[in-house]
Image (cartoon, coloured by chain):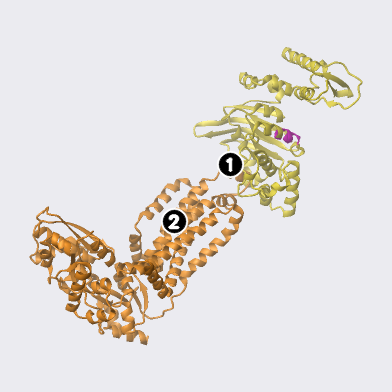
Amino acid sequence: MIELKEISKKFGDTLAINKASFKVEEKETLVLLGTSGCGKTTTLKMINRLIEPDAGQVFINGENITNQDPDILRTGIGYVMQNIGLFPHYNVAENIAVVPKLLKWDKEKIKVRTQELIEKLHLPENSLSMFPHELSGGQQQRVGLARALVTDPSVLLMDEPFGALDNVTRTSIQKEFKGLEELKRKTIVMVTHDVQEAFELADRICLMDKGKIIQIGTPKELLYQPINDFARKFLAGQRLFLEFKVVKMQDIWPYLPKVTLQDGKSLSADMNVWDAMELLRSSDRSELLVSGANKESKAVNFEQLTKGFNQFQNAQVHE
Amino acid sequence: MNEHQQTLWQFMHEQSDKLFAQTLQHVGLTFISLLIAIAIGLPLGILIARKRKLSGTVLGIAGILQTVPSIALLGFMIPVLGIGAKPAIVALLIYALLPIIRNTYTGIIGIDQHVKEAARAMGMSKSQILLKVELPLAIPVILAGIRTAMVINVGVATLASFIAAGGLGEFIFGGISLNNTNMILAGAIPAALLAIILDALLSLIQKMDFKKLRKALYILPVVILILGGFYALPSAYGSTLTAGFTPEFMGRQDGDLGLKSTYGLKIHTIVISDAVMYKAAFSKELDVISGYSTDGRLKAFDLKILKDDKSIFPPYYAAPIVRDETLKQFPQLAETLNLLAGKITDLVMTDLNYRTDYLHQTPERVAKDFLISTGLYKAPKNGHNGVVRIGSKIFGEQYILAEMYSMLIRGNTDYEVSTKTGLGGTKICFDALMNDQIDFYPEYTGTGLLVLLQPDPKIAKEMAHNKDKTYDYVSAEFEKKFKIKWLKPIGFNNSYALMMRQKQSKDLNVNTITDLKNYLDKN
């Protein structure tokens, strides 16, 4: 668990962070979202003391981090950055082994763990002896992720981790990232300026502007209960897409046709509307079988899906 | 051309022992100073990369030191560190510092900020970041700095021979003073090769990838240390007294060679420039030096000339030498220059030299005072009837003579004067004269005979000890060979002489060179 209490930071005369406070629960992913210069990266870097706050405190698992040795603190926190920052003079295996070596792991343990990560992150076997410049951007970022995960730290900080990747690579890595078991056990704070990425990966989003926290909430809360004009306008451009992403089958459950007794492979109602629509469009099926709560199943076609979504939307507006 | 190469090869072959020893000394000097420069420059570079505020000051100071002329720097070192290896190494290391500090600094601050941040974020301590990230990544740039420093050092190390630190400069500067092209080349070619080879080796290391580089970096300091160790090879020549001879003296029949063959003198000898030799003798770094008999420092440093009882040092009567063509062009010149003929005795010359060398009066003032006291001075006429170019070698006496001639010409003729003083040695002066870059300069009969004419040793020996015979011979031969005229001798005889401190000479009861030999044989 991470907690920031009234953190402030000045660079020269400009107030980069103004009394920011938030909590990140255990195993939660909090995304700091905002435009460039809003203070999100500065906020992130104060969690592992790459930047020291001028005022306020940071607690990790209840302990004030200013009382800890910064180097020891950092070995216990995974860090992934946009520019990856792999050591150009180390090969992949050595890059991954940096923190374990600082912690004086024995060679065998490092080897086993490295092997495990290589497989989980779909890095080619022969890449271990390659140098960073010999890898593609996506592979480099996977190595960067492996380096942050190797000691299985409970806290992971990510500064625009997919920012340097092209769109196609980014989407696929985001997907993999979301599916990674290892990450589900971790408390993650991630910085991004990409609204879609934030909605894709966040449990909660912390929207920032000019060094201040504007709103903290789930993607759904941000979308349907924006706290002010800034929050509303920030999402306006991609609103429809985000709504499809945020609304789940179980949300529109009441607006879908009645229960069928059809048997067969059914999909979880946890799926969002966007994914369901994509599935209908990309496969030759005309209907999807979705299983909701109470072991009910419903068969839905594209038309019913959009209709149900619209009804749900109307209900939200009237609420 | 072919013949020429052959003789160079022969020379190198003949002198292979010396050549080898000098090369080792040269390599040794270069690497000892390089090693120390790395030991100082690397941490300094790291420090200023950490504390950027200091960088301007440190790089500024190193830059200023770099611009001090090497000879001057060597000169500054002598009062503090004496002569020999110590001041040479310090001077070299000062030259090597700037490229090493600067490249360490740029190498470290040039590293990708994100890599440094990643290192910090992973929990590396400052020293771990330095050793595992910053230095390895800066190494190619640092090596480039070391490479520059090394090449500079190979070059500057040739000057080490001026202060008795050895190296290939002994041949180079000996050759320049002795008009011996082979000798110059025997020093210059190995020095150039050394620079090229060492540079190529380091460039190989620089181009290695990180993996090989790591191994190479363990080996490099060891190699530098071993190469530096060459210098420490003892010169096995034990004697109780130490002699300092100029490079020129070392190679002359009427110098060290004659001392060995005629007197059988065996003395521990180091090669040193005459600019610092007297002072070194005075401060007891040297016991015997090869000075000039009219040198003012003889008086200034209380030195005593040892009698040349087997007369190996031929007379060195000074007289201006002028190209025939010049005499035609300036009809009044010969007459004017001859005004000084017979006017300056040994004693007078020593006194004049003493005034410049020790009392630090300007040669101009000394010259003017002398001319006034002898009634030769006339106010300049500011003539416009052509310009006479006067040359001089690079020591005090020649500066004074050049000034006197310049005043005489200005006062007695309608010619204007330009002076090119401080030409680095007999060869340079004489070549300038031959190539019509100067019109005349004061030369010495002995030098004319032994250095410029280099006659058959028999003739030389026959001639050498008679003042008039030597003068007649060089006059005739110069006219025949070079179309150059010797005007009338000025009067003094500035020959080579072995000198000791007055007190030591008294204590050891050494008054002649034979005494010195006997003393050395006994001890």
Q: Is residue A69 magenta?
A: no
How many marks are shown on the rendered structure? 2
Q: Tell me if I can see residue A225 in this picture.
A: no
**In the rendered image, the vertical position of residue B260 relative to residue A16, given as above or below:** below
Q: Quadrant of the C terminus of chain B?
A: bottom left
Could you tell me which residue is drawn at 71 percent across and 45 percent down?
A150
Residue B455 at x, y percent in the picture: 27, 76
Residue B253 at x, y percent in the picture: 30, 77
Mark 2: which secondary structure?
Answer: helix
Badge 2: residue crowd in 10 Å (few <14, some 14–19, many ≥20): many
Mark 1: which secondary structure?
Answer: helix
Residue that lies at the very extreme toward the front in this rendered image: B2
Give left or right: position of B315 versus A29: left
Residue B522 at x, y percent in the picture: 36, 87
Residue occupied by mark 1: B114
Highlighted range, magenta: A173-179
**Residue B97 tag number:** 2
